[in-house]
Image: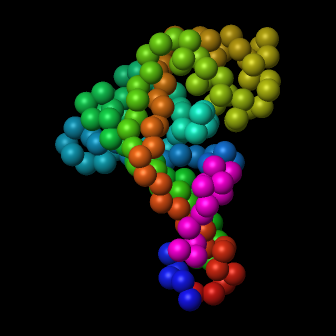
Amino acid sequence: MANLRSQIMMTDEEVVTYLDSARILNVATNGPTGHPHLVAMWFAMADGNPVFWTYGKSQKIANLRRDARMTGLVESGESYNELRGVELRGRGVVVDDYDAVLEIGKAVGVKYNGPSALSDAGLPFLEAQATKRVGVVFEIDHIASWDHTKLGGRY
């Protein structure tokens, strides 16, 4: 019998599907004291990478400008046999270009608010927000995943 770890790993396709449908990406950056700075972010997937936007003066951006290393966690499940998750390790690339930031904002807006985010009423809001935000592209170096539902209640 294969080891338990190999049985619960998600395939590459399962990871993509899971990240596409996930709602919250917990992001850890390295704070100024060396302690992790952990925040929950709305995000979207773009070209295989998680992307999000935030205020340019936020602590996570100050951290990334000093040290680009970043870890992310997306997880779900209430009981042990339902636990699923993906841990991402890599670098957060800060995006300052207005047009690129707006594209990230549009992707996040559509994911959480649907097509109305790009409507005549929604788009001006995103455009105004993009003037005071920066984007982050999470370039992934390593992925760890688990899906305990694959065990069918066996341990």
All told, the count of numbered labels is: 0
Identify whether 78 is placed above or below 43: below
Any magenta on residue 33?
no
Q: Which quadrant holds the C terminus?
A: bottom right
Residue 129 visible, this angle: no
Residue 82, x across and y down, in percent = 64, 71
List the single residue furthest toward the left.
33
Task: Give, as a single range, the part of the protein colored magenta.
Answer: 6-17
Display colour scheme: rainbow
Residue 62, x across and y down, in percent = 31, 28
26 or 138, which is in the foreground? 138
Residue lying at 53% horizontally and 32% vertically, measured from the top left: 52
Residue 122, x across and y down, in percent = 73, 17
List the single residue furthest toward the front.
1
Residue lying at 43% horizontally and 52% vertically, measured from the top left: 142
Any magenta on residue 11?
yes
117 or 139, which is in the foreground? 139
Q: Quadrant of residue 27?
A: top left
- Magenta segment, prevailing SS (helix, strand or loop): helix
Q: Is residue 65 left or right of residue 123?
A: left
Residue 4, x across and y down, in percent = 52, 80
Q: Is residue 80 left or right of residue 59?
A: right
Q: Is residue 86 left or right of residue 96?
A: right
Q: Is residue 53 left or right of residue 127?
A: left
Identify whether 99 is placed above or below 79: above
Q: Quadrant of residue 150?
A: bottom right
Residue lying at 66% horizontally and 54% vertically, measured from the top left: 13
Residue lying at 25% horizontally and 30% vertically, measured from the top left: 66
Q: Which quadrant holds the N terminus?
A: bottom right
Residue 50 visible, this angle: yes
